Image: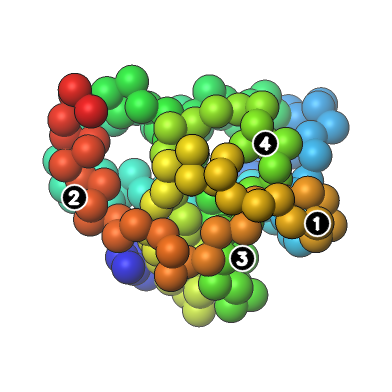
Amino acid sequence: MIRYKLNDEIRKEARDYQKKVMETNTMNHANYTNLESDGRYFVGYLGEWAFDRFLNENQIPHKWDCKADGYSDKADFIINNKLIDVKTSSDGGYKIMLISAAQVNKYQKDIYVACGLRNGYIEIYGFCYHQTLVDMPTVKLKILSKKMPHEELLNIDELLPILRNRNI
């Protein structure tokens, strides 16, 4: 697991992003989280920020596709044509990555990265492949979901050689 301490500057950046999304978001997007509508953008931005920092620290060239217009992005990150989606949970102590089954089926990403907001830190727990989620049973929570326990995720450091290799 990788951990980054949050400071006032990044919190402000995330709140500014959240505000911009809420001002320009005319879409009625499904909310698969337990957060109020605007809070999910704040938490999501923090997870993406942490993954961006992790990639920069490991000198992985990437494109962070962070849209604040209310429209879905192709992926949060694009690296060597791999589509990566970052999923971030709020400060609830959950030890799972939860994704709507409809989202897994409709928007195929190559890799999903699990992050969480915990006690003033953003933590990166690990990653899994799209096919892993497809093969998992679907569970009924608020909505039909794919539920990946953190202990079943691959170690985030194992993602580095995959992202560096253009042929994988």
Q: CA distance from mark 2 to mark 3?
A: 24 Å
**Tag nearer the camera, 4 or 1:** 1
Say which of 162 and 43 sits in front: 162
Disc 3, disc 1: CB below 8 Å? no
Q: Secondary structure at mark 3?
A: loop
**Tag nearer the camera, 3 or 1:** 1
At x 70%, y 45%, the residue is 100
Q: Is residue 5 visible?
A: yes
Q: Secondary structure at mark 4?
A: helix
Give the total of numbered labels.
4
Which residue is the site of mark 3? Answer: 90
Which residue is the site of mark 4? Answer: 103
Q: Quadrant of the C terminus?
A: top left
Which residue is the site of mark 2? Answer: 57
Q: Amino acid at mark 4?
A: Gln
Q: Amino acid at mark 3?
A: Ser
Which residue is the site of mark 1? Answer: 140
Q: CA distance from mark 3 to mark 1?
A: 20 Å
- Which disc is residue 123 wearing? none
At x 82%, y 51%, the residue is 143
At x 59%, y 50%, the residue is 136
Q: Secondary structure at mark 2?
A: helix
Q: Earlier in the sequence, mark 2 or mark 4?
A: 2
Residue 56 spot, x, y in % from top left: 22, 44
Q: Amino acid at mark 1?
A: Lys
Residue 110 spot, x, y in % from top left: 43, 32
Q: Earlier in the sequence, mark 4 or mark 1?
A: 4
Q: Amino acid at mark 2?
A: Glu
Q: Earlier in the sequence, mark 3 or mark 4?
A: 3
Q: Earlier in the sequence, mark 2 or mark 1?
A: 2
In the picture provided, is 87 more to the left or to the right than 156?
right
Say if 85 sits above or below 24 in the image. Answer: below
